[in-house]
Amino acid sequence: MYSNVQPFINSDLTNCFQSQYTEIESLLFNLLDSPVKYTKHIGGTHHFKYSTEPILDILVGVENLHDITSLDEKRLNYVGFYRLHHKYNKKVMMAKFNNFHELKQQVRLHIIQMNTQTFESYLALDYLLSTNDEIALQFNTKKHQILQHSFTIRQYEMQKQKYFEKLCKKYL
């Protein structure tokens, strides 16, 4: 997998992230016997309130996290999504990559069980960052600081997750 954080962007002049989201949302709901009950375009590519990597993040709600079976994973593999096998707390992460050589993430699915604290935190934090300019600016500053001290994308993502947890405790 691509080991560096991709260069940040600040806008989507071609509106490709929204159209990509619409296409993927349709695909997720139309998979045969899909366990998907909810989707939402989240993160910086949705609102551009802060600098962000050019990765479309999608929150995917399922009734039960165990509903994501190997059959569902295989169906998602057929349409270009692959499970990320890092240690994730109460979620399944899948990604679509630019190619099999560089493995730059283009789309990430954050698959989370609905009606859980994790799911509600995702929704609340996304709302907070997309509607509160002051907090979005603080987050932008923090992202750049984290980037300066992270040597891999994994370190960057772990530090960003810690900051999200801090924001949740402070504001939610």
Image: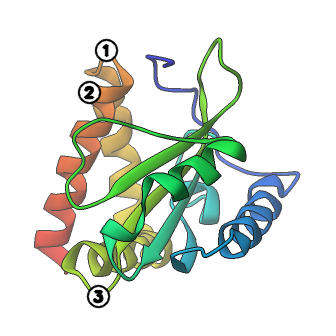
The residue that label 1 is drawn on is 151
- The kind of secondary structure element at disc 1 is loop
Q: Position of residue 4 (x, y in %)?
A: 46, 18
Question: Between marks 1 and 3, how big is the CA–CA gap?
Answer: 35 Å
Q: Position of residue 140 (x, y in %)?
A: 41, 48
- The kind of secondary structure element at disc 2 is helix
Amino acid on which the number 1 mark rests in the picture: Phe
Question: Between marks 3 and 2, how big is the CA–CA gap?
Answer: 29 Å
Residue at position x 42%, y 71% in the image: 126
Which one is closest to the eye, mark 1 or mark 3? Answer: 3
The number of numbered discs placed on residues in the rendered structure image is: 3
The quarter of the picture where residue 148 lies is top left
- Of the image marks 3 and 2, the number of the one nearer the N terminus: 3
Question: Between marks 1 and 2, how big is the CA–CA gap?
Answer: 7 Å
- The kind of secondary structure element at disc 3 is loop
Residue at position x 22%, y 40% in the image: 87
Q: Position of residue 42 (x, y in %)?
A: 52, 66
Compared to residue 160, the image places residue 137 above or below, namely below
The quarter of the picture where residue 49 lies is bottom right
Residue placed most toward the observer, 137 or 55: 55
Residue at position x 26%, y 27% in the image: 155
- Kindly indicate whether the residue at mark 2 contacts the one at mark 1 (C-beta within 8 angstroms): yes
Amino acid on which the number 2 mark rests in the picture: Gln
View extreme (front): residue: 71
The residue that label 2 is drawn on is 155
- Numbered mark located on residue 115 in the image: 3
Amino acid on which the number 3 mark rests in the picture: Asn
The quarter of the picture where residue 23 lies is bottom right
